[in-house]
Amino acid sequence: MHFDRCKVVAAGIIQVLFAIQAAAGAPVADAGSVEQLPKLALGEVLLVADDVYSASNKNRESHVDDQGQSAQAEELFQRARKACGQGEVDTAMRYAARVLAADPDHHEARQLLGYLSVGDSWGGGYAARRFERGEIWNPRFGWLRAEDLQRWKADERPLGKRWITLEEDTRRHRTIEDGWRLRTDHFEIVTNHSREAAAELAAQVETLYRVWQQLFGDFYLAKSDLLRRLDQKKVSGHRRQPFSVVYYRSRDQYNSALRSQQPRIDITLGIYFDTTRKSHFFAEPQQNPGTLYHEAVHQFFQESGRSAKKVGALGNAWAIEGVACYFESLMNLPREEQSGLGPSGAGRFFTIGTASAGRLPAARHRRLIDDYYVPLAELSPMGTSDLQQREDLAQLYTQSAGLATFFMHYQDGIYRKQFGELLRLLYTGRDTPGKLSELVGVGYPQLDRQYREFMEHLTMPPATHRTSPDGSPSLRANLVN
């Protein structure tokens, strides 16, 4: 069981901008080392290509307008192909996504990412079946018959073979037990808020899942399956057992429904129960995307393979919470900074692990200003119950967020694979308190020193726009202590 505490925002923290390297336009790595994808110095940019669930999705058309763009797509796909051969699933996923920044309809890259052709767009096997039945995905209502769209817009709703008013439909779904159910390729949303809320939430978690796949792809896809995709074998592109998400109309309903499972439910903004395999959220102004990302990521890790019972009970609980907190830093890249990253309709660009996002500013403040830090040798043996019983729980959450970001991005990600392996061992119940040090080949005291160095390097002067060597815009700033 996981629950998100109140966010801690330290007063007086200097918000910093930092280097953002163009996701698709940056020079690709040397062909002999596919692991070295273009990254941010701190954080990185990821593309989620438009698909059937995207609010911005348009009918498919050719976006490749010059030979240079086509050549770039093919060069990037060769990097993806090489990563497949080396069994680097997440690396292959990131390269395939970058291919789509240059050519959104590159069939081989779409196949590698698990997409199928769905009418004039792209989606998974579930979307394809709905389309074959004459249905469309509408960003406001979700799946419906194409010929019924105007009646939906007129606030009519289907009930069997007849139509009822929106008011009657709302009364029929006023409790969560009778809530609307909306299915996508990877999720099932149940809500008593509205059909519109279900469709909006479904699109949001589909996007989050695509981001997660690019960073932790080998949690859900084996090397053999990756190679089958590369060989153009048919893919399902959907989950047979979708992730289950429950979305309540109000906090009061959320609290009442879940208090028996979690007595401290009142202090949470969202919760995932690994026992019932459901995430729960509510619709009120105090909600924020970070909570959704945090709890959904717990669900992705727990349900994307065979997981042990009581994950993190015997140690390394900080890593489970830290990686979920890391995803709280996921942000849309502002539209004005997307120019040159890809053609119109390529998709949406996101940043993650950036110095001014999520809990990272608070983590830096705690380490450098407050001098708060629990050494890894002391932190690693702590299980989930040990963590939750501490009075400094909020501080430990921010430190865990900082540590996860450190292991993902320190020196362009030299510890990323090992951190991913620790998480794999955690979720299969095969980790030990000293396993992370063993995996990276560095003692905990040295890792503690490197973490402080990483935090010191987060402070930067305001970034200035300039042009990267290939002509695409980027943000650059020099690191300062």
Image (spheres, rainbow, N blue to C red):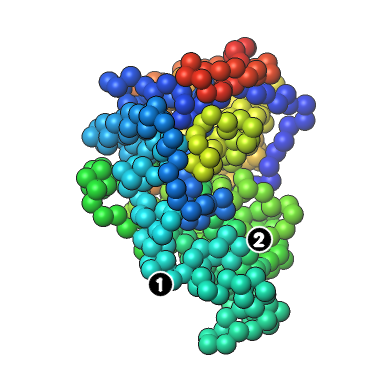
First in sequence: mark 1 or mark 2?
1
- The location of residue 285, given as percent across then percent down, is 74, 54
- Residue name at image x 46 percent, y 23 percent: 26
Judge whether residue 36 can be spotted in this image: yes
Identify whether 44 is placed above or below 481. below
Q: Which of the 4 image quadrants contains residue 242?
A: bottom left
Q: Which mark is residue 133?
A: 1
Q: Position of residue 309 (x, y in %)?
A: 40, 55
**How far apart are the two marked residues, 1 and 2, measured between alpha carbons?**
32 Å
Residue at the spot x=63%, y=40% of the render? 393
Residue 282 numbered tag: 2
Quadrant assignment for the C terminus: top right
Instruction: Check disc 1 and give the amino acid type.
Output: Arg
In the image, 272 versus 234, the foreground residue is 234
Q: Residue at x 29, y 31 (%)?
A: 78
Camera-side residue: 78 or 153?
Answer: 153
Q: Of helix, strand and loop, which one carries label 1?
A: loop
**Residue 132: which quarter of the image?**
bottom left
